[in-house]
């Protein structure tokens, strides 16, 4: 999966201009991707104008950043900050811009007391589930969206700089799920995109079902009522429907239906966040999602192989009449329910609602 950050020359493009990003992003992934049974997430923060942005130094380091233990990968163009108490990609910005699109879930500043609480923020990983545990699982300690954003991630010693750029490997253990996850992050010199590959290993004595959803969340000041979200989702439905047909009524991107109200354009979020979560299937070889702030000439986007992540899941939040969060999620499922419901439903729009991982085995998501 690739996460892209572009500096866009003003005036900002129309919605159709988003689709022009698809071809170059696809070419980037084809050049770097290896096709193991990995689920690969790649992100890119890209400079698109004919000017130079630069940091004084380029490096990769484990340090404290705005009161949180973090791993920072920084080249001459951009900086990526990964929070170690939860593994979230919490800051991704260009060298000349203090604007961080992933500004959600944290508000600490430099000089604040050290905060080591494990929690989700920015772009976090949902593993081994997306959504709520069952009542009994919750009583036994399973958190919402699984354990990955609620444990400490450890950085392996062999991080640093090579001829290919800046590289780091980190991992986390999920004791209740019986899974482990290893993440490899690469940031090449003089570019504004990051490549991330995550490998999930089953440590249980038996095979098990699970889900894995990438959960990037954008927030102000990048997110405004004028921020435009686009993607190549197709057929979709709003969460909250009743079994046995939670996908009814269905609709096509960029439309969503909200009860008896007029259709909603999911590309914008102004003052009403209903429907709150909407899921779409991807029919092309690669899935992609972007968010554009035209006023600041900035765009962030992700691209991934659809065989790994067939669903795009969009979450929206409004407070006091203003947008405060938008989730640009994508993953292995499109139904926000416990496994008991998923195993009853099995699939929606001919797409599976969960993955199976045997023992011993690994799934690699690229």
Image (cartoon, rainbow, N blue to C red):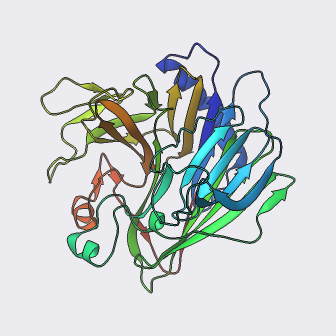
| Pick the front one: 329 or 210 | 329
Residue drawn at x 22%, y 44% as measured from the top left: 247
Q: Say which quarter of the image contains residue 258.
A: top left
| Pick the front one: 305 or 100 | 100
The answer to whether residue 1 is visible is: no
Q: Position of residue 325 (x, y in %)?
A: 40, 40
Q: Is residue 335 above or below residue 273?
A: below
Quarter of the image for the C terminus: give it.
Answer: bottom right
Q: Position of residue 14 (x, y in %)?
A: 50, 16
- In the image, taking residue 15 as reference, residue 165 lies left or right, namely right
Q: How many marks?
A: 0
Residue drawn at x 45%, y 30% as measured from the top left: 230
The answer to whether residue 158 is visible is: yes
- In the image, taking residue 76 as reference, residue 156 lies left or right, namely left
Q: Say which quarter of the image contains residue 328.
A: top left
- In the image, taking residue 329 as reference, residue 4 lies left or right, namely right
């Amino acid at each position: 999966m690739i996460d892209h950050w572009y500096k866009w020359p003003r005036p900002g493009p129309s919605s159709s201009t988003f689709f022009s990003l698809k071809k170059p992003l696809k070419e980037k992934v084809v050049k770097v991707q290896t096709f193991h049974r990995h689920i690969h997430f790649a992100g890119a923060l890209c400079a698109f104008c004919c000017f130079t942005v630069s940091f004084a130094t380029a490096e990769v380091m484990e340090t404290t950043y705005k009161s949180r233990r973090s791993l920072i990968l920084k080249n001459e163009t951009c900086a990526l900050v990964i929070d170690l108490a939860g593994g979230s990609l919490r800051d991704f910005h260009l060298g000349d811009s203090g604007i961080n699109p992933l500004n959600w879930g944290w508000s600490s500043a430099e000089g604040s007391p050290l905060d080591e609480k494990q929690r989700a923020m920015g772009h976090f990983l949902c593993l081994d589930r997306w959504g709520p545990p069952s009542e009994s699982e919750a009583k036994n300690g399973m958190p919402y969206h699984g354990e990955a954003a609620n444990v400490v991630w450890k950085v392996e010693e062999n991080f640093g700089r090579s001829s290919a750029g800046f590289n780091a490997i980190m991992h986390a253990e999920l004791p209740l799920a019986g899974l482990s996850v290893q993440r490899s992050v690469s940031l090449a010199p003089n570019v504004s995109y990051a490549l991330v590959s995550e490998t999930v290993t089953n440590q249980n004595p038996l095979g098990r079902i699970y889900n894995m959803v990438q959960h990037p969340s954008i927030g102000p000041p990048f997110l405004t009522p004028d921020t435009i979200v686009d993607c190549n989702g197709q057929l979709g439905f709003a969460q909250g429907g009743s079994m046995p047909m939670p996908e009814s009524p269905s609709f096509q991107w960029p439309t969503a239906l909200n009860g008896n109200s007029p259709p909603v354009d999911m590309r914008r979020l102004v003052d009403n966040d209903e429907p709150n979560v909407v899921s779409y299937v991807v029919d092309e070889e690669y899935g992609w999602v972007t968010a554009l702030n035209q006023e600041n000439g900035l765009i962030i986007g992700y691209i991934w192989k659809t065989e790994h992540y067939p669903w795009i899941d969009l979450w929206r939040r409004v407070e006091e009449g203003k947008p405060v969060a938008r989730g640009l999620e994508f993953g292995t499922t499109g139904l926000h329910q416990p496994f008991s419901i998923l195993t009853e439903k099995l699939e929606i729009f001919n797409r599976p609602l969960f993955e199976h991982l045997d023992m011993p085995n690994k799934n690699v998501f690229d």
